[in-house]
Amino acid sequence: MLWKIYFWIMLVLLIVSMFLENEYGWGESVLRIVSTIIAIINTVGLYGYVYKKKFYSQSFWKIIFKLL
């Protein structure tokens, strides 16, 4: 149950952070785009874990979480 609450909080924070303004210029915007992509991948993995859905193989997620 707590994992589901955590998932929805993280999803809301991810969506809100996508609409916040960037005040630091172009270099920071590239970092923000990369960070958003990583957060989306992690959120998909968390969704799969919380709701027992299988997205890709288990070895794929092990590699992704070790790299990110």
Image (cartoon, rainbow, N blue to C red):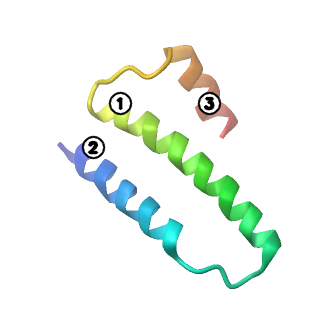
Q: Nearer the viewer, residue 4 or 21?
A: 21
Going by the numbered disc 3, the residue's amino acid type is Ile
Between the residue at mark 1 and the residue at mark 2, the CA separation in whole angstroms equals: 9 Å
Q: Residues within 10 Å of mark 3 (few under 14, many from 20)?
A: some
Q: Earlier in the sequence, mark 1 or mark 3?
A: 1
Q: Count numbered badges in the picture.
A: 3
| Residue 52 shown left or right of residue 24 in the figure | left
Assign the C terminus to one quadrant of the image: top right
Going by the numbered disc 1, the residue's amino acid type is Tyr
Residue 46 drawn above or below residue 8: above
Q: Which residue is mark 3?
A: 64
Mark 2: secondary structure: helix
Q: Earlier in the sequence, mark 1 or mark 2?
A: 2
Whole-percent x and y of residue 35?
Answer: 64, 56
Whole-percent x and y of residue 31?
Answer: 73, 62
Mark 3: secondary structure: helix
The residue located at (74%, 82%) in the rendering is 24
| Residue 1 shown left or right of residue 61 in the figure | left
Q: Which residue is mark 1?
A: 49
The residue located at (45%, 34%) in the rendering is 45
Q: Are marks 1 and 2 in contact (CB under 8 Å)?
A: yes
| Residue 65 shown left or right of residue 58 in the figure | right
Assign the N terminus to one quadrant of the image: top left
Between the residue at mark 1 and the residue at mark 3, the CA separation in whole angstroms equals: 14 Å
Q: Which residue is mark 2?
A: 3
Q: Nearer the viewer, mark 3 or mark 2?
A: 3
Q: Are marks 3 and 2 in contact (CB under 8 Å)?
A: no
